[in-house]
Image (spheres, rainbow, N blue to C red):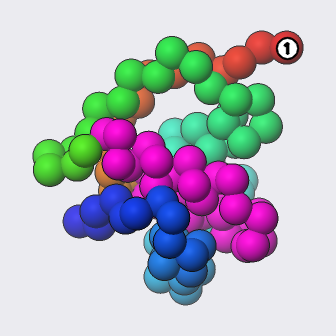
Amino acid sequence: MLKPKNPNLPISELMPPMAEIPEQFKKHKLKNKWNKLFTDWFYFGIEGCEWIPKEGINTDEAYAHIASIMGHIDCRHEHKEAGVAYLLSEFFEDVKYRRKVG
């Protein structure tokens, strides 16, 4: 299981290389809940989050790690989506949230 890292690290240390990310997070037409969460967060923003972390994961550290990647401009969008979705699946069992409106 992957663990959250210091969010101030370079993007290359926060996110696995594209080749190491499982295919299920790369196929944009076959969205899973983690890719959908990425899309909602990236394009609309999210609120009212209830994160359910996996055992041994600190929610605040995991959120900071993911939020840091979301704010980086030094990687391709496809890599960012796949990497964030994959890491979300590694850090959390589930999440409930609302997509921001307006």
Q: Is residue 91 left or right of residue 64?
A: left
Which of the 4 quarters of the picture holds residue 46?
top right
Residue 17 lies, in percent from the top left, at 54, 82
The secondary structure that dominates the magenta segment is helix
x and y percentages locating residue 37 in the rendered image: 58, 38
Instruction: Label 1: state its secondary structure.
Output: loop
Q: Is 19 positioned to the left or the right of 55 in the image?
A: right
Horizontal arrangement in the rendering, residue 39 relative to residue 88 (left or right): right
Q: Is residue 49 visible?
A: yes
Determine whether 72 is above or below 59 in the image.
below
Side of 68 where 39 appears, left or right: right
**Residue farthest front in this picture:** 8
Name the outermost residue toward the right.
102
**Residue located at (36% from left, 30% from top):** 51
- Quadrant into which the N terminus falls: bottom left
Q: Is residue 35 visible?
A: no
Residue depicted at x 59% and y 73%: 11
Magenta range: 59-88
- Residue 81 screen position, x and y as percent: 65, 58
Q: Residue at x 66, y 21 (%)?
A: 99
Q: Quadrant of residue 54?
A: top left
Measuring 57% from the left and 75% from the top, which residue is drawn there?
10
Quick one: quadrant of the C terminus? top right
Residue 87: percent from left, percent from top: 44, 58
On screen, 26 above or below 35? below
In the rendered view, would you say 3 is above or below 40? below
Judge whether residue 79 is colored magenta: yes
Three-letter residue code for mark 1: Gly
* Depth order, front residue of 64/75: 64
What crowding class fits label 1: few (fewer than 14 Cα within 10 Å), some (14-19), or many (20 or more)? few
Residue 51, magenta (yes or no)? no
Residue indicated by mark 1: 102
